[in-house]
Amino acid sequence: MKARFMVSLLLISSTLLLSACDGGSSTDVAQNSTTVLDGKATIVLPKGFVKMPKEMLEVKYPMTAQRPQEAWYAESEGGKVSIAFSAPNSAMSESQIPQFAAMMKNQMSAFAPSVADVTVNGKKMSRLEITTPAADGKIYNLLQFSSRDGKLLISTFNTTEDLKDKYAQAGKDALSTLKY
């Protein structure tokens, strides 16, 4: 479990290191679900979000082990706003999610994170909210931990602090539509 925890921590840490680019977009939530995770889940993404190309994923997450399986971003913001999905091969039951979230909160205590338990489409999940430093500012992160098919699923919304007021609610709303 310790090795799996460390892998999960690396995935989350890499997701927190999203760096900034440039700006200006709408935060209206689209009405159509987007299929994610190789067709195993759906989410209603904010308007203007597109799938992050492999090349961009590789630049933002240079270490393969830390790269999310899939990410979507506000194209007009050039990578400053994104939603990513990491599905490490870590066994995790729904009942273990709050304990995992508490461990993550403890690991990141230097950044004053907060944790909340939520229910999304009938599934119990935990959310960790945190603002972390980056090379060119601060990044607001909302990590949603859940159990999908008995394995940990980490769904993350990130935005640079300068766009937080514009996008944070749209990110929370999108994560609240995750269905699998």
Image (cartoon, rainbow, N blue to C red):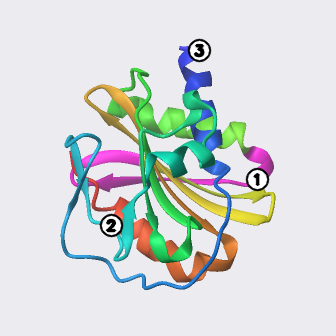
Looking at the image, is mark 3 or mark 2 earlier in the sequence?
Answer: 3
Task: Label 1, secondary structure: give it.
Answer: helix
Disc 3 to disc 2, how far (Cα)? 33 Å
Q: Is residue 178 left or right of residue 86?
A: left
Q: Nearer the viewer, residue 47 or 97?
A: 47
The amino acid on which the numbered mark 1 sits, given as a three-letter code, is Phe
Q: Nearer the viewer, residue 12 or 62?
A: 62
Q: Is residue 94 left or right of residue 80?
A: left
Which numbered dot is residue 45?
2
The amino acid on which the numbered mark 3 sits, given as a three-letter code, is Ala
- How far from the left and from the top, in percent, is residue 104? 62, 38
How many marks overall?
A: 3
Q: Is residue 50 left or right of residue 143?
A: left
Q: Residue at x 37, y 75 (%)?
A: 48
Q: Residue at x 63, y 75 (%)?
A: 22
Q: Does residue 113 show up magenta in the picture?
A: yes
Q: Say which residue label 3 marks.
A: 3
Q: Does residue 35 show up magenta in the picture?
A: no
